[in-house]
Amino acid sequence: MSSIRIARPRRVLLTSAAFTSFAALGPPAALAQQARESLPPIEVSPAQARKPAKPAAGAAQSARRAAARRPAAVSAAPKPVVPDSTVQTPLNTNAVAESASRLGLTVRQTPATVEVISAETREQGYRTVSEVAQGAVGVSSGDNPAEPSAFSMRGFTNSQINTLYNGIKIGPQNMTSRIVDTANLEAVEFLKGPASLISGEGAAGGAINFVTKQPHTGPARNDANFSWDSLNSFRAHYGSGGSTNVQGLDYRFDISRSTLNGFADDTNVKTFGTSGQLNYRVSDSLRFWGAVEYREDRSKAYWGAPLVPAAFSGSHATTGIVSGNYVSNYNGTNLGAVTIDDRTFNTNYNVLDNRNVAQEVWLRGGFELKLAPDLTLKSQAYGYGAERTWFNNEIEAFNSTTNLVDRERFYVAHSQRLVGNITDLIWDTNIAGFDNRLVTTLSSSYLDFVRPGAANFPGDSVSLVDPNRGFYGLLTTQQQTARIDNEALSFEDRLKLTRSFALIGGLRVEHIGLDRNSTDKNGIVKAGFPFTKDWAPVTGRIGYTWEAVPGLTFFSQYATGADVAANNIFLLSPTQPLDLTTARTYETGVKHLFWDNRAEWSFSAYDIVRKNVYAAAGGMQLNIAGRQESKGVELAASIRPIEPLRLWGNIAYVDARYADYNFAGGSFSGNTPPNVPRIVANAGASYRFFTPWPVELGITGRHVGDRYNTDANVVTMKAYTVADVYAFVDIPKTAFNAVDQARLTFRVRNITDKRYAIWGDPFYPDQILLGAPRTYEISAAFKW
């Protein structure tokens, strides 16, 4: 069963400059939105005549806000001004989330909880995808080296959450995710709850979509970013985009490189990424586009600190990081009450010749054709290739008999090829006087996945303090293959019964075909292989949105999802259950934008049930859990009471439990899934001084509640609260003529130097990943 572990890649990184407060420096929100739009949206007018509303008064409003508004359509009396989809609101609900709907709806128009953290949302200084996720409502994550984008959302983790790249799924998140520099990202989208309608199998807990920067029409704009921190990490990025001298041809190009050093000894990540896209508008009715992207990362990994008996650590035992009594899953010794030894905070137990390496290439291209005023055809073809290698010691288990740390080596490599096509037909029409938009989508893909892995697992034991790290040693390999074909037909529709009330729903019929083979070290096919399996899940969503008054929208939905019962479709074997799990959610909520677009809040409540769950029981073992239930509420708000001051915060509560989770020797019914905190909260404030050289000061805080590292719930990763502070200064063009806009930023992360457990891998329950200590960072950003 060892092979099951390999399912998880590294960590996903993002440039601090990419997500550092830059509202004044960044391109207008309208420009960013335009870059993501294709052909102009098609609107069908209602039967009654329209006339423009009077513009809102308010001479005291700033020119920036006044320019960002447009009159709202009315049928009788003028209505308050409501911003159009190009205006960024405090919670970014005017953004179009491509991972949430193919109807071109904004977040506010979607009957689901969707969050878009865009490149304009930079005050929090997000550098990595993990950090972006930690700023989202109710989402937690950890930089697990085996699972770099390890997310927890609404009680679900790992491959229960789809990770998409520009709306395309490349495989289970816990096998295919890699380190990604945010410099090339325009936005990260979070769609919460079962969401298979859009992204297919794997979205029982939701979907997270990474959207790369795209061309815009207009003058060329360039930007460059540099940063350095107290761990001697360095990041650099250059990007450029705009219109060319060729009529209708727009471009975008980005390149970034970084060396990111960890707080543990001899740990680092080196990344390189470049991406480019060309859009060619032949006419108002036809556009072609093509994109290419290359990424690579090379790292020396940290796999966590071992759980140690508190009695053994003595005066070096810590409090507030972990608690509980534990019997080692690896060596079976009873550790009793456990702790993290303070002498291991910076210790790296990995072998000296460890390495994680990946190269990835994306090719995408397509067209948009307006067949008629109310009919648009969109199609894109894509190809993806990846080569990945892990070469590590991944187990660090304290042995209470020898008082040493037992280790075990692990090796795996991936060779992945994926090709596919997604075609949409968008039809805007009027049914009995009601506006209606229907999107029919046909998608298909073929994935070839070859996976050499270790056939032996060398091990040794080292001292807890100052271990002799040694080298990997003997390697004997075996091979596994997976070929997956996928075809899906889906329909999504929005019917506006009134100007303020809309029904939104969809249905997806999907076919998944799997061919698996596995050979031993001698190339002999293993028992039960090869085998094939087919699934045909049917998933969907039905809901409504009701704008009771301008800016105040109520919504509800019922949605379903499906994912593979046995953790990972690439690793299924004939002896494992081969059924799909099913998940459904009931959700209701409200989204409210008010006070002349200076304040916004949202609230949602949900009830999710996932059946036929196949869960990790510790180590490489898997158990059947009949059902997983998750109920919770989420609240987010942002307000700018006066122009210089911004306040924001969010809080989420979730009660996630297993039910009917019985197995030989016990039961986990009533237990909480690993890495699921009951409470997650974020808050922040910033104040801008409008001096000749504008200065902004800000603080952000985050609280994450208690979590467990396995389904057994015997070891608790204790709740923690951390805070960051920052200060930046905008250098006016009069002082620095070389560029149009320049900003210098100083940031302190984890200002109290809090020591805490950020993540626990249920497959490696003898060790805990620790969060980073206090670090200092300086950065510079330029636009011209």
Image (cartoon, grey):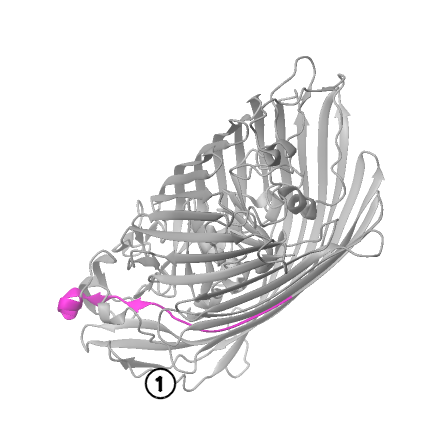
Q: Is residue 595 or residue 758 the one in the foreground?
A: 595
Tag 1, which secondary structure?
Answer: loop
Q: Is residue 309 or residue 712 the one in the foreground?
A: 309
- Residue 610 at what x, y percent from top left? 45, 44
User: Mark 1 Cα within 10 Å, few/some/many (few <14, many 20+)?
Assistant: few
Q: Is residue 405 left or right of residue 625?
A: left
- Is residue 728 one of those drawn in magenta? no
Vertical position of residue 348 compared to residue 712: above or below: below
Name the residue rendered at 51%, 63% in the picture: 175
Mark 1 sits on what residue? 470
| Rendered image quadrant of residue 51 | top right
Q: Is residue 520 or residue 45 the one in the foreground?
A: 45
Please indicate, yes or no, whether residue 443 appears anywhere in the rendered image.
Answer: yes
> What residue type is disc 1 on?
Gly
- Residue 684 at what x, y percent from top left? 40, 44
Image quadrant occupied by the C terminus: bottom right
- Is residue 304 one of those drawn in magenta? yes
> How many discs mark residues in the rendered view?
1
Looking at the rendering, the stretch of residues picked out in magenta corresponds to 294-316
Q: Is residue 475 or residue 76 the one in the foreground?
A: 76
Vertical position of residue 88 compared to residue 228: above or below: above
